[in-house]
Amino acid sequence: MAKIALEVFLAERAEVLKAWPTGKDVHLEEAIEYQKSIPDAKRFSSVLKKADLERETLIQPRAGVALPQEHLALLKHLQDEGHADLLPTTIDSYTRHNRYVEAQVGIDESIKTGKSLLNGFPAVNHGVTICRSLNDGLKVPLQVRHGTPDARLLAEITLAGGFTSYEGGGISYNIPYGKNYSLEKTIRDWQYVDRLVGYYEEMGVRINREPFGPLTGTLVPPCISHSVAILEALLAAEQGCKCITVGYGQCGNQAQDIAAIRSLKVLTKEYLDRFGYTDVQVTTVFHQWMGGFPQDEAQAYGVIAWGAATAVLAGATKVIVKSPHEAFGVPTAEANANGLKTTKQLTQMLKDQNNVDSPLIQEEMRLISDETHSILEAVLKLGDNDFALSAVRGFEAGLIDVPFAPAQCNANQVLPARDHHGAVRIYEFGYLPFSEELKNVHRNKLDERA
């Protein structure tokens, strides 16, 4: 579909805001004025633009607890002690599934026990005023990070609450996160989110949008995560978003990871320009290793440092940082800050070395680009360049297939494997629309390992 008509969007808003009592506190014009009062130093789009121009890699953690004062204290610690350039608010699982009654029970129990009993911050229950108190209490930009298939009310409350970046998408917050969600519905619900961001843009407020790049975080070939990121970027741009950050999860082979981030930015701009979205600001995010972490703390720091170095050498605009306690669950504030400090040390040491290149990196970039083009061209043709329809039909046909995803609308026929050098290749192609020439590259590299 094309851009949602304003009258359709506003009619839908009236229903969305009724889903929980805090929705009544969202007043769009007043929220826009509040957003306009936020200085550039605390606006995601401005800080990302400056970093992109200066070829600097910013650092950002994950973090979120149930109660406002504890959450603010945690974020301040990561800002002041961890030297985070950008801050998150990770949303709890009940809110992600629109289970606000149970989220409220978690809040009440957390108050009684004095301990966070939710695995994130229930922003919908807390409402606009409390969200603004977070933003007002910090010095750096604040982003919503979650995992919500229907994120409409969460977007309304957090954007009105002063968050200047919103993460996720109708594909990346469906396929890796749930079993029975309709892809058509999640894409439509996220078109609403993008239309809301586009409306803020029309009123002079730039909100950053970030599709979730790593997907399942388990040996996802770059061409597959790139195809999803670019489709979600097109869907966002179609609704008026002008600042988009596309992401990729570290796979472990440094040449492939560097090539992935560099090709992702080039390919995203290529497709946005092709469809007329030439004024979109495109940046990149590199996610440090999403798989299992060593329990030994010293070894965990090694994994973090490797991810930090790769992010800088790749020229990523920002890096999402892990903690040395990753193997044990939710980290302490101190451990989270230590992961940030380790990453900051690497970004500072390597900031003038992000022009690294080699024939191997160039070879990987060409391969990733050829594969991504093959997928996207087939998918867009199937949907006659309607981005939403193309995505739905592409998954139905298995032309996009995310490895190890729980979603029933995902074919789950693609099987990745590591080659002799640790790069992610494809062992079983499923219905990926690759030429025999492309398939033979993977076969030859896996034969070499065998």
Image: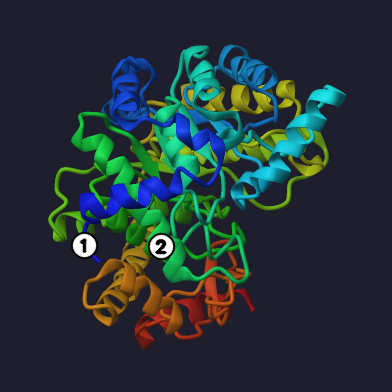
Asked where in the image residue 297 lies, by quadrant, the reply is top right
Mark number displayed over residue 31:
none
Q: Which mark is residue 187?
A: 2
State which quarter of the image contains the C terminus. bottom right
Splitting the image into 4 quarters, where does residue 355 fall? Answer: top left
> In the orientation shown, which residue stands out farthest toward the right?
113
Count neighbours of disc 2 (C-alpha within 10 A) and say few if under 14, some if 14 to 19, many if 20 or more.
many
Q: Residue 321: x percent and y percent? A: 58, 35
Question: Residue 361 at what x, y percent from top left?
Answer: 38, 54
Visible residue check, residue 330:
no
Is residue 287 among what the camera can see?
Answer: yes
The kind of secondary structure element at disc 2 is: helix
> Which three-letter amino acid code belongs to the residue tagged 2?
Ile
Q: Please name the amino acid that badge 1 sits on.
A: Ala
Q: Which residue is mark 1?
A: 2
Which one is in front, 38 or 379?
Answer: 38
Q: Residue at x 22, y 56 (%)?
A: 3
Q: Is residue 50 above or below residue 397?
A: above
**Residue depicted at x 82% and y 32%:** 109
Q: Residue at x 29, y 51 (%)?
A: 9
Looking at the rendered structure, the secondary structure element under dot 1 is loop
Is 49 or 133 nearer to us in this picture? 133
In the image: residue 104, left or right of residue 3: right
User: Residue 311: where, in percent of width, then height?
Assistant: 47, 39
Mark found first going from the N terminus, 2 or 1: 1
Report which quarter residue 217 is drawn in.
bottom right
